[in-house]
Image: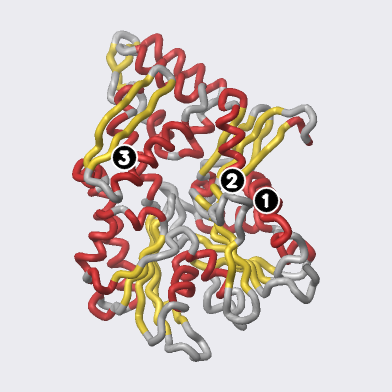
Amino acid sequence: MTFADRPAALGLDFGTTNSVVALAGTAGTADLIGYADRGAVFRSALCFWQDAGARGGLAVEAGPWAIDEYLEDPQNSRFLQSFKSVAASASFETASVFDRRYRFEELGRTFLDRLVTHGGSRLDAPLPDRIVVGRPVEYAGARPDPALARTRYDAMFAGFGGARAGAGAVHYVYEPLGAAFSYATRLTHAATILVADFGGGTSDFSVVRVAAPGAARRCAPLGHAGIGIAGDRFDYRIVDRLVLPMLGKGGQYRSFGKLLEVPRSYYADFADWSRLALMRNRRTLDELAKLAKAAVDPAAIERMIAVIDHELGYTLYDAVGACKRALSTAESAPFRFHGGGIDIEAVVTREAFEGWIAEDLDRIAATIDRALAEAGVPADAVDRVFLTGGSSLIPAVRALFDARFGSDRIATGGELTSIAHGLALIGQEEDLTAWAA
């Protein structure tokens, strides 16, 4: 690729669960980057393992290759995914990986380096001057700090792409706006649209006015809202109902002649893949070993230790994901998880799952109301609703919009790729300030 041939912009959807890259040319088009025979969706995951021949004694892989390395030797590797979910968390300082500690931005730069490498010749330098990166409207976490997240993102993306050669800058755009720009290419008339982006860590909503084709400015954002509830929270509801009771949640232990509840903080870490992976440290495992000796049901705590110590987090959530995806098309689905002394085979009905996530859906519905209120647009003035993100395929999520807007106004497609596609197109706009978050 010569300097003259390089694309006009790169759009990066750095997602909690998956990441996607698109390159835009100069004619209002954008193409997704594929990774060998793995498609265009790159899992947001890292796997580390000790290797004397590697720099610093640690080898690392990312994306689907990280999963391959983990599955080959789970006991002797450290698998991290969904680390984006701690970007805005002040309580997260570093992740312990063997004898090294990694800050968020170091994990991020390592991830980007492997993503670019696996992207092959199309991601070789020179990359575009304009790099457009998606960010959530609302970051995940109990008390997210957007300023901290911005600082960490800046450090993560410093020197990435065009900026790597000092030629350009990284621009941040709300993720649902990327999806809106992508969907606008399918519209042949003016419309007011609501974009609902359901990711792994957050659910984000943007109301956008789309002008007719040929307008100088095709899209104009009107209002946004977001909430840190999405696919990962739905996954945790399944784990909480089917798995955690077997790991001692709700159980008791003896302390100075009293019976106390097993601390719930241990089980809260199972709600976050990034925190679950980090529980495999000597301090936590020693605490759990002491807890097992005092527990009324020591076998349950020992099973929790086995899940952590045997690096079964990926296996556990892979089983959860398979069940959840099956429930999107079937009224019931099997849940199967085996490992660490746990053998669970259960049938989960869609009705039961929808009951488990009902509270989450209520909060998502309230967030949709906030987006419409900020935009000053009543529901009946929305012409089209564009649903994107993996969790938009959950029937109960779709039902929220069918009931509110009518099924005839709902549009879908490109659930995992529309954001990156739109971000790349935004990168071709003359003035990015209207889009920058």
According to the picture, the residue beneath numbered tag 2 turns out to be: 63
Q: Nearer the viewer, mark 3 or mark 1?
A: 1
- How many numbered circles does the render carry? 3
Amino acid type of disc 1?
A: His
Looking at the image, do the residues carrying marks 1 and 2 touch, with CB atoms under 8 Å apart?
Answer: yes
According to the picture, the residue beneath numbered tag 3 turns out to be: 237
Question: Where does the image place residue 397, in percent across and percent down from the top left?
Answer: 28, 56
**Residue at 29% of width from left, 45% of height from top?**
327
Dot 3: element: helix
**Residue at 72% of width from left, 66% of height from top?**
127
**Residue at 39% of width from left, 41% of height from top?**
321
Judge by depth and name the residue closer to the eye, 436 or 59: 59
Q: Is residue 397 above or below residue 379?
A: above
Dot 1: element: helix
Looking at the image, do the residues carrying marks 3 and 1 touch, with CB atoms under 8 Å apart?
Answer: no
Left or right placement of residue 72 versus residue 164 in this view: left
Judge by depth and name the residue closer to the eye, 53 or 207: 53
In this view, which residue lies farthest toward the front? 37
Left or right placement of residue 138 versus residue 26 in this view: left
Judge by depth and name the residue closer to the eye, 358 or 398: 398
Closer to the chain start, of discs 1 and 2, is: 2
Amino acid type of disc 2?
A: Gly
Judge by depth and name the residue closer to the eye, 283 or 423: 423
Alpha-carbon span between mark 1 and mark 2: 9 Å
Closer to the chain start, of discs 3 and 1, is: 1
Q: Residues within 10 Å of mark 3 (few under 14, many from 20)?
A: some
Q: How crowded is mark 2: few (under 14 residues within 10 Å), some or many (20 or more)?
A: many
Alpha-carbon span between mark 3 and mark 1: 34 Å
In the drawing, what numbered circle is on residue 231?
none
Q: In this view, does 172 lie above or below 208?
A: above
